Image: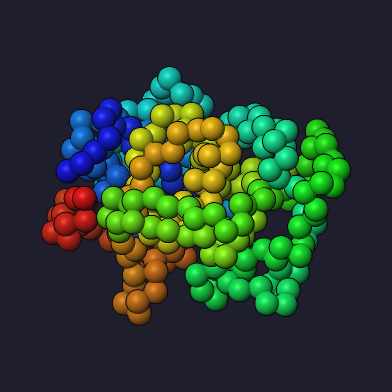
Amino acid sequence: MNFPVPYRGRLAPSPTGYLHLGHARTFWIAEQRARSAGGAVVLRSDDLDAQRYRLDFATAMMEDMRWIGLSWDEGPDVGGPHAPYDQSKRVALYRAALERLHAARLVYPCERTRRDVIEAAGAPHEGGADDEPVYPASFRPDPGDDLPPLGDWIGVNWRLRVPDGEAVEFTDGRLGPQRAVAGVDFGDFPVWRKDGGPSYQLACAVDDAAMGITEVVRGEDLVRSTFRQLLIYCALGLKAPRFYHCPLMTDEAGVRLAKRHDALSLRALRGRGESPESIRKAWATQGTAGT
């Protein structure tokens, strides 16, 4: 296996529901890769979704991960040199990153709704009908326009202006070479939300860099997010980690598992008497932890 040295991996669950088998398998692959490289595992709670976050989900999250056999060297419950490990306690870092992007004039305020973007004439969808539409260039302010200050409270979305026509490339540890063209395959995207918090893209990139993560292991549904985050790393002068995107688990109908699949949550499986050993054995036979 070809791993970065020294290796630092991470588990980054969101406490917005009970962890299901798909999440757990991805975290297991992440831990296996870190341990195979003799590296460290960081647990970070991506708890920025204030509308869906619940304290009992956060508690259950760690209980279920330990039940399935996962362990970590740094995290909300064990501490570490990069504390705090809850994103809700790291907002000052994200705000500082936004201010750097603002000073470089790489972002702009946007009051367009998602419906506005979807209904824009000729707005293609990024990778499929279920994905975000490409933000229309006609909605952008002129680069020479005055840029308003951020203010203490941010009540509008701020978008990163992507470099149109620029190819963004990386080599995935499982999928191989990946390539997308900014402004064609994906458009300007939010780095700060109108509810006053950072977007997933900004928070994830800032934290992975600050915590020294050398490889990000996550589901292959997030490949397109990787292109966006690579632009953030570049804009902020941060070193990007490597990436390994895992195959997704599906239910009997072929639908990707989500937290709505309560019957396949670790908590439900545990309640039915399933053993963590049998679950891990099934994952091991699938051979998904290699390069």
Question: Where residue 287 appears, x then y in whole percent?
Answer: 16, 57
Give the residue displayed 80% in from the left and 53% down from the top.
142
Does 128 appear above or below 144? below
Give the quadrant of residue 175: bottom left
Residue 128 shown left or right of residue 122 in the figure: left
Percent position (x, y) of residue 235? 58, 39
In the displayed structure, does residue 83 sit left or right of residue 67? right
Q: Position of residue 277 (x, y in %)?
A: 16, 51
Which of the 4 quarters of the picture holds residue 216? Answer: top left
Q: Say which of 132 and 269 sits in front.
A: 132
Using the image as rendered, state which of residue 77 and residue 120 is in the foreground: 120
Between 111 and 143, which is closer to the camera in this rendering? 143
> Going 32% across and 28% down the picture, which residue do you hit?
73
Q: Picture quarter containing residue 222?
A: bottom left
Q: How many marks?
A: 0
Image quarter in which the N terminus is found? top left
Judging from the image, the colouring scheme is: rainbow
Question: Which residue: 62% across, 52% down?
Answer: 162
Closer-to-camera residue (272/287): 287
Residue located at (78% from left, 42% from top): 154
Tell me if 115 is positioned left or right of 69 in this view: right
Residue 60 in sight in this render: no
Provide residue 219's location: percent of width, then percent of height: 38, 56
Q: Is residue 157 left or right of residue 184?
A: right
| Residue that extends furthest to the bottom in the rendered view of this protein | 253
Q: Is residue 79 above or below residue 255?
A: above
For the question of whether residue 277 can be seen, the reply is yes
